[in-house]
Image (cartoon, rainbow, N blue to C red):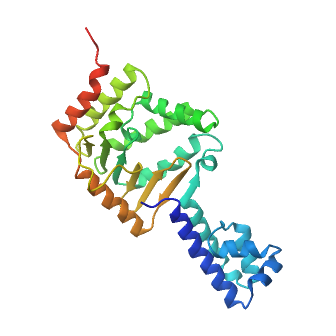
Amino acid sequence: MPSSSSVHEARQALGSRLRQIRRQSGLTAVELARRCMWSQSKVSRIENGHLGVSPDVIEKWTQACGAEALKEELLADARATEETYVEWRKMERTGLRQANEGATARWEKTHRFKAYSQCLIPGPLQTESYTRAVLTALRARRDVHDDVEETVTIRMERQRLLSDSSRSYAFLLEETVLHHRLGGRQLMLGQLSRLIQASGASNISIGIIPRTADRSAIWPVEDFWIFDDRQVNVELVSAYLTVKRPLEVRQYTDAFTRLKSLAVYGPEAFSLIGAALAPFAPTD
């Protein structure tokens, strides 16, 4: 599966483009470094994709090479490259709210959602209490500004899209997700009951991959979202990954298809949810 290596490949492609521009201008790496007041090693790292390309680098590079006409195009390429892999500390420097607000526009433009999870109940299926528990844990772990309540409101409001019958949602959950506790009995009882309720909607399918499934074809992978088979988002430990290259997107859609073949639906899925519910059911 693609990871931060996708960013390195994109940086290599941009670096190769910058090398080509330098050579076409007749400049050596030494001369370019001198004109930009950089070390020669910096030029080498940029051209080989080992260093990110900032707007300042593009500005100086195109000016030194007499290629100012290419500046805007190169700036767009650099932005696209760096947006592929964004560290959480950058996305959440003002708290959790900003990143969640930014996701809403993408959700509103999407009509076919696919999601796979081996860790948590996906956001659209979460109860308010479960969402609050998730965000509270994230805020504490990443030590960011406390705007949990505002972010909960944003996520709950986004769930209105589930009622739009023109949109389809396909969720795949590892059975272990049902057993990951994020709070007390009432929270888990409400969340697992919510899964059963949501599965009754005609535009929502919820598949559960049993713990007993034969994983010869595909084993558990990182949690991911697919938007209209055009974009994939993956939440890594350190960063947020956005995949748009068609080849890589196809890798994820293929993985989803393979994972789906392992899942159970309907009564069989309800049975697994019921087994997870049992420890939280009221006792006489």
Figure check: 16 above or below 276: below
Residue 21 found in image quarter? bottom right
Drawn side of residue 70 relative to residue 268, left or right = right
Image label count: 0
Q: Quadrant of the C terminus?
A: top left
Q: Depth check: give the residue in front, 53 or 80.
A: 53
- Look at 62% across and 32% down and name the residue there: 146
Q: In which quarter of the image is the N terminus?
A: bottom left
Q: Which residue sits at x=38%, y=55%? A: 226
Residue 59 shows in the view: no
Foreground residue among 220 and 280: 220
Q: Position of residue 137 (x, y in %)?
A: 53, 32
- Residue pictured at 49% horizontal, 38% vertical: 154
Which x, y percent locates residue 127? 39, 31
Residue 79 sits in quarter: bottom right
Q: Residue 107 at x, y = what percent? A: 43, 50
Q: Is residue 16 left or right of residue 126?
A: right
Residue 2 can be seen, yes or no: yes
Res 138 quadrant in image: top right
Q: Residue 280's spot in the image, x, y percent?
A: 32, 20
